[in-house]
Amino acid sequence: MTQQDEERTRTAYDTVADLYADTFTATEPEQPLELAMIDHFVTSLGESPRVLDAGCGAGRLLPLLAARGCRPQGVDLSPGMVRRARADHPAYRCTVGSLTDLAFSDDEFDGVLSWYSTIHAPDADLDRVLAEMARVLRPGGHLLLAFQVGEGVRDIGPGFAAHGLRVTLDRYHRSVLEVASRLERLGMPVTARLERGPVGRETDPQAVVIARRPVG
Ligand SMILES: C[S@@+](CC[C@H](N)C(=O)[O-])C[C@H]1O[C@@H](n2cnc3c(N)ncnc32)[C@H](O)[C@@H]1O
């Protein structure tokens, strides 16, 4: 992402952080299907796995991961979101940082979970973000990505205007095939994929893709 892209995303999430954290405190928007994908991901990681919630937002998935036996920690671009993650979920380490340049060592985590955090990365930057996630995974570790399915870019700023918040924020939609192809080109074979239609107030299909970093 260019510095300008990152700055825009950071400013937008700083602006909406309290609304986001107060609206979604746990897994309100998730369906049992995608929660089952998280369960499947966790069972692939071994005993007490260290899991990076990459783009953790206000940290709502950190307790869910811990309840499933993981040792989770979060990283997010937005200091406002990290402030809420630390306040609302003080049991977990959460730091400010970018997915394009993760401040973690190679092979550090058993799992990386990206729950709707690659959706603001322009197409030209997505491979770099995926490569960073793969880099911090140990061989045999798994990466999970959740995202909205579709094509092109949407301006999602107007959705926040109804709450009196003015933000500029783009969301990039992709097909499961495109995301899976990018992962496989990076040497990360896809082990599971889910696509479901929109539910409730959702306007788009949703997807979850899991890939594995090969051993050796
Ligand atoms: C739709 S929110 C999802 C947050 C959280 N995963 C959840 O489900 O509640 C997207 C999050 O990704 C973060 N994000 C977007 N681009 C990022 C980047 N380049 N580096 C780190 N975090 C990023 C945003 O700051 C935001 O908190």
Image (cartoon, rainbow, N blue to C red):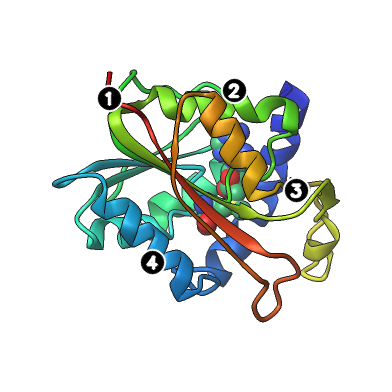
Tell me how far mark 3 sits from mark 2, CA to CA: 17 Å
The residue tagged 2 is: 128
**Amino acid found under the numbered disc labelled 2:** Arg
Q: Position of residue 52 (x, y in %)?
A: 36, 40
* Image-based side of 152 in relation to 69, left or right: right
Q: Secondary structure at mark 2?
A: helix
* Image-based side of 166 in relation to 103, left or right: right
Q: Position of residue 170 (x, y in %)?
A: 79, 45
Q: Are marks 3 and 2 in contact (CB under 8 Å)?
A: no
The residue tagged 4 is: 36
The one nearer the camera, 143 or 85, is 143
Say which residue appears at 69% left-offset and 51% top-offset.
15
**Amino acid found under the numbered disc labelled 1:** Val
Q: Closer to the observer: label 3 or label 2?
A: 2
Q: Secondary structure at mark 3?
A: strand
Q: Are marks 1 and 3 in contact (CB under 8 Å)?
A: no
Q: Secondary structure at mark 1?
A: loop
The residue tagged 3 is: 171
The residue tagged 1 is: 215
* Image-based side of 95 in relation to 186, left or right: left
Tell me how far mark 1 sits from mark 3, CA to CA: 33 Å
Tell me how far mark 4 sits from mark 3, CA to CA: 25 Å
